[in-house]
Image: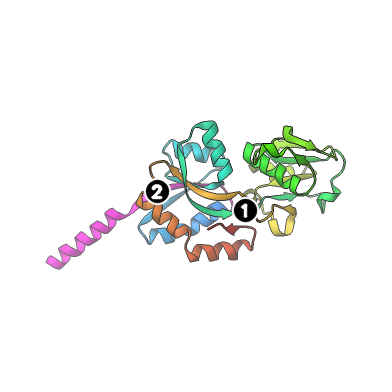
Amino acid sequence: MLRLIAAALALSAGMAAAEDIKVGVTPGEHAEIMEQIVPLAAAKGLNIDVVEFSDYVVPNTALADGDLHANSFQHVPFLENQIKDRGFDLVVVAKTITTPMGVYSSKLKSLDELPEGANVAIPNDPTNGGRALLVLADEGVIKVNPDAGLVPTVLDITENPKNLKFRELDAAQLPRALEDADAAVINTNFALAAGISPREDSIAMEKADSPYANVIAVRKGDEEQPWVKTLVEVYHSPEIKEYIETKYEGAVIPAW
């Protein structure tokens, strides 16, 4: 009888130790990787409800409002800009992956083929729009004012020899823009979600030394919570690293 009671108490303690959290992600690699993390985390007593968002703004709002415990979808410059503009009290607890931004076209085979006055679609949020312009500047298509740092806008373009016309669209809509635009600069997660291969379909890619590593963010004050340690530990596990390297073949790179 005593053994049965002890076993029951141990089981009860184990059940009490289990924790449920909600983690926000965006479609594509962020959602796919988090789904791989779910069973590994569950084995460590952390039950993750993966909540998918179709844009880049709501996941931080949901986290700040307490509807999420963490999110995993954004790079540091984007988070810093959101904190500055919206006053979110969020902090980074771990790096996750780097997803080089790509330039795509259904009409052209290289950026050299961009015609005079070509339409180029870029994200309409400040950090990803600026990132897209920096990719084009790195390819020699335009020049931007270096004083703008990591967040130049079209107003910071100092040289535009082909008089390109920029269409600023929601990042999730950029794959569809390929039907009309001459080229589009697309975040890897939305490219993958649309069935576009960064390795095979891009006509230019962001350089590997990009400062845009993605991160896990939580509300300030939660950094030392046990579930944070478990989430990061599982994300940084050899199993997840192997999954990323095998699944994405260099289109997505572990950043830890």
Where residue 43 sits: x, y (%)? Answer: 38, 62
Q: Residue at left 84%, top 50%?
A: 112
Q: Secondary structure at mark 1?
A: loop
Location of the N terminus (image quadrant): bottom left
Q: Which mark is residue 21?
A: 2
Q: Position of residue 149 (x, y in %)?
A: 65, 40
- In the rendered image, residue 71 lying in the magenta stretch gets the answer no
Give the residues drawn in magenta, as a range. 1-28
- Kind of residue at badge 1: Thr
Is residue 38 or residue 229 the one in the foreground? 229
Percent of width and height locating residue 75: 57, 46
Name the residue: 64% across, 63% down: 249
Task: Tell me which amino acid carries mark 2.
Answer: Ile
Q: Secondary structure at mark 2?
A: strand
In the displayed structure, does residue 116 sit left or right of residue 249?
Answer: right
- Does residue 4 lie above or below 133 as drawn? below
